Amino acid sequence: MSLRNEQIQKLESEAFEVLIIGGGINGSVAAAALSSRGVKTALIDRKDFGSETSQSSSNLIWGGIKYLEGLEFKLVRELCRSRNQLIRAYPSSIREIRFFTNLDKGFRFPALFIYLGSLIYWFIGNCFTRPPKLLSKKSINHLEPVVNTEKSIGGIEYSDAYLVEHDTRFVFQFIRRSLKAGCAAANYIESLGSEQQEDKTWLTRVRDTQAGKEWKIRSKIVINACGPFVDFQNSLSRQKGKHRHVFSKGIHLVVPRLTEIERVLTFFADDGRLFFAIPMGNRTVIGTTDNRVTEPETEVTDEDRRFVLENINKRVNLKQPLEEKDILSERWGVRPLVLETDQVDLNSDWTKLSRKHAIDTDPESMHISIYGGKLTDCLNIGEELCQEVSKMGVTIPHPEGSWFGEPEAKRRQEFLNQASEFELDSPFHQSPNETKAECLWRRYGEEAFELLEMIRQDSSLSEPLFPEAENLLCEIHLIAKKEMIVSLADLLRRRTRLALLFHHDFLKNSKNLKEAASIIFGKQTENQWSEYF
Ligand SMILES: Cc1cc2nc3c(=O)[nH]c(=O)nc-3n(C[C@H](O)[C@H](O)[C@H](O)COP(=O)(O)OP(=O)(O)OC[C@H]3O[C@@H](n4cnc5c(N)ncnc54)[C@H](O)[C@@H]3O)c2cc1C
């Protein structure tokens, strides 16, 4: 039986202390924290895990230097502490990176002022990273010739961190951890609303969107972690909280790599907002935008593309300006921003809304809703949700139990030693700075040992899916077994990042990729292929 069907069977036949609705970063950390600490937990998502906001981020793990302008010192302090904790806990997935910032004439602050701000930021972050530096126009030209310094007044360099792989892979490792700890978790299971019984337990009506089957899941507590859909889900369950969401759309364009050095290029766009060129393998992710929208479902418009291309072309020196034909892939989503229910909607100045998360707990009805949040904030959210569940009277058997982080460094070394038998010490085409073995460890942790076992049995499984790919055939076998793939998009966009790194048409024409996909989809490959492409 497939892993997903096993999980569905558990969801059908068992009762739970906590049911979490929504498997983005917030729902996934809640599931990992509660199940690792011994609470009987279930997690469902109506699509794939991480397939809404959590797949549209800038992949940054950062303290939010820009929030200093709004004097949000407490928020910046909390985010910096989370960033530091994440860098320590995930040494191969989350790394410090330099942000190289150029400032143009006419900018609202002088370079020295921005530098002082970056020093304050560094102190607020406990001086955990390398210190910031003030840059002259001359040194920017010398260090990063791609930056257009025609109007430069100098700049700064400071540190934050980024997800080396990508956001949804990060989300999935919390799902993996939850499953290991006994959580019943399945994707493509939609909540149609929860109803509280006289004995106070919740019955949540759910639907398997693949098989069409409906049933009810019983739990003592419901956690609504539906991201931008939290308000809608609450309306289905007749819950009224103290908060609500408004939405800001953000998009990114992925293009061939703009600069050799692994650093984030930072600019201020025409609208005065921070604007980044962020490395992803040997590509660059450019963005983002910040536009008020009224609905959570969104897409990239021509205007969005034009804004990003025009802004980057003004700020870098390329042989040829970037055009639409250079775009390899696009990312888009809405930031769910938190307002108090009766707070007046700040239409004019809404970009100044705090980006802090909020948790609404109703101990009477045993219902929790989580609003806002950031990937960077995820460990705080996991801890806070454990506390809220405990306050509602559910016993947490192992309150100090560890629920996040990579395996110990010595296990990694053991893996790298074993991997050296198999010529995995060269880099993938897409990640020139690391060996294949290091990439495999980052993606699969302890499960990477299974990959070596597969290669031992069949050496052809150490081949890449296609010559330029950054995934090996053995990965596809592991993903098929352990990562609940339902659609081709789950594989190409979330468990791997192939759909981000390569143009749609390139993937469509890859016979090797199709063969690899058939390992997962068997007779369904043709259907999956035509549906996706
Ligand atoms: C453009 C952009 C850039 C960003 N950059 C960063 C960054 O660099 N760093 C950072 O820390 N943060 C960043 N963020 C913020 C961060 O991505 C989000 O705060 C975070 O991903 C929200 O996670 P979530 O779990 O609340 O929501 P989501 O990821 O949206 O998850 C909610 C889940 O609920 C599911 N769901 C909805 N309805 C139902 C239902 N009825 N039944 C079952 N499931 C349901 C959805 O399918 C979805 O998977 C960025 C956000 C955007 C939009």
Image: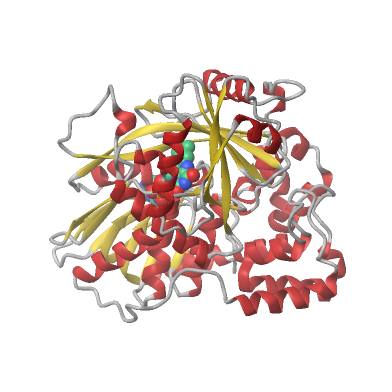
Quick one: 37 or 284, which is closer to the camera?
A: 284
Measured as percent of width and height from the top left, residue 118 is found at 44, 44
Location of residue 231 (image quadrant): top left
Q: Is residue 455 above or below residue 276?
A: below
Measured as percent of width and height from the top left, residue 457 is found at 83, 75
| Residue 393 visible, this orientation | yes
Quick one: 424 or 208, which is closer to the camera?
A: 424
Residue located 34% across and 45% down the image: 372
| Residue 206 visible, this orientation | no
Quick one: 507 or 166, which is closer to the camera?
A: 166
Q: In the picture, which quadrant includes the C terminus?
A: top right
Q: What count of labels does the image hold?
A: 0
Residue located 44% across and 51% down the image: 122
Measured as percent of width and height from the top left, residue 444 is found at 63, 66
Q: In the picture, which quadrant includes the N terminus?
A: bottom right
Residue located 75% across and 48% down the image: 430
Measured as percent of width and height from the top left, residue 147 is found at 65, 29
Residue located 52% across and 18% down the image: 303
Q: Is residue 56 left or right of residue 31?
A: right
Q: Coloured how?
A: secondary structure
Q: Is residue 294 above or below residue 205?
A: above
